[in-house]
Image (cartoon, rainbow, N blue to C red):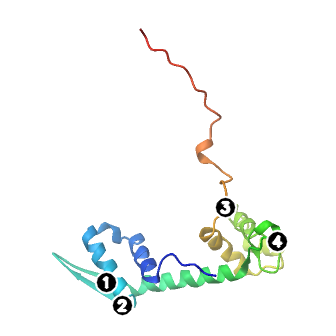
Amino acid sequence: MVQRLLSKSQVLYLALEAKGLRVLPLATRRQIAKAIERDPSMGKLDISSERVIIVQLSWVRKEVEAGLHRLAQAERMVDADPELMHGTPVYRGTRIPVHAIADMLVQGATVEEILEGYPALTREKVKLAPFYVKAFPRRGRPAMRPWATSGPRRASEHRLAS
């Protein structure tokens, strides 16, 4: 079952925010969000106030659609069965954890090196691993805790001068 928390028009608006829309005044951004919600298929939006603002939506819509397509591909390639490796997301039909492949790529391994070690995978599956990991991070506490770089701290007593 796929559960969507945001509509496509909401994702489109968030992508626009990330691309720089957030520099506009809040009232203008609200006006843009409402216009996109009314007609998410529009290609261009003209906002007239004190100055003319034209928002090109077609290229952002293409990016959002491509990202949603890649996400669907990534979800189809993964199986997270509680009976298989305690529910660890693995490539469908294998016991190869997706997070392990993404970690290898982060550590500098090339796609060719990974394919040599895991011939059951395809180039596309290896390339989608980081995308899947971004969308579905590991559960639980992070392995690296940047806030815990130093050892435990001692509580000290401070006496007030009387």
Asked whether, in this view, residue 158 is left or right of residue 70, the answer is left
Q: Nearer the viewer, mark 4 or mark 1?
A: 4
- The x and y percentages for residue 142 are 65, 54
Mark 1: few, some, or many residues within 10 Å (few <14, many ≥20)? some
The image shows residue 72, relative to residue 109, as above or below, that is below
The quadrant holding residue 28 is: bottom left
The residue identified by callout 4 is 84
Q: Mark 4 and mark 3 in contact (Cβ < 8 Å)?
A: no
Asked whether, in this view, residue 12 is left or right of residue 52, the answer is right
**Mark 3 and mark 2: Cα distance apart in space:** 38 Å
- The x and y percentages for residue 141 are 66, 54
Regarding mark 2 in the picture, which secondary structure is present there? loop
Q: Mark 1 and mark 3 in contact (Cβ < 8 Å)?
A: no
Asked whether, in this view, residue 99 is left or right of residue 156, the answer is right
- Which quadrant: the N terminus? bottom right
**Mark 2 and mark 1: Cα distance apart in space:** 9 Å
The residue identified by callout 3 is 139
Q: Give the amino acid at mark 1.
A: Ala
Regarding mark 3 in the picture, which secondary structure is present there? loop
The residue identified by callout 2 is 42
The image shows residue 56, relative to residue 97, as above or below, that is below
Q: Earlier in the sequence, mark 2 or mark 1?
A: 1
Q: Earlier in the sequence, mark 3 or mark 2?
A: 2
The residue identified by callout 1 is 35
The quadrant holding residue 40 is: bottom left
Q: Mark 1 and mark 2 in contact (Cβ < 8 Å)?
A: yes
The image shows residue 135, relative to residue 46, as above or below, that is above
**Mark 2 and mark 4: Cα distance apart in space:** 45 Å
Q: Mark 2 and mark 3 in contact (Cβ < 8 Å)?
A: no
Q: Residue furthest left?
A: 50
Residue in the foreground of this view, choosing between 2 and 111: 2
Q: Nearer the viewer, mark 2 or mark 1?
A: 1
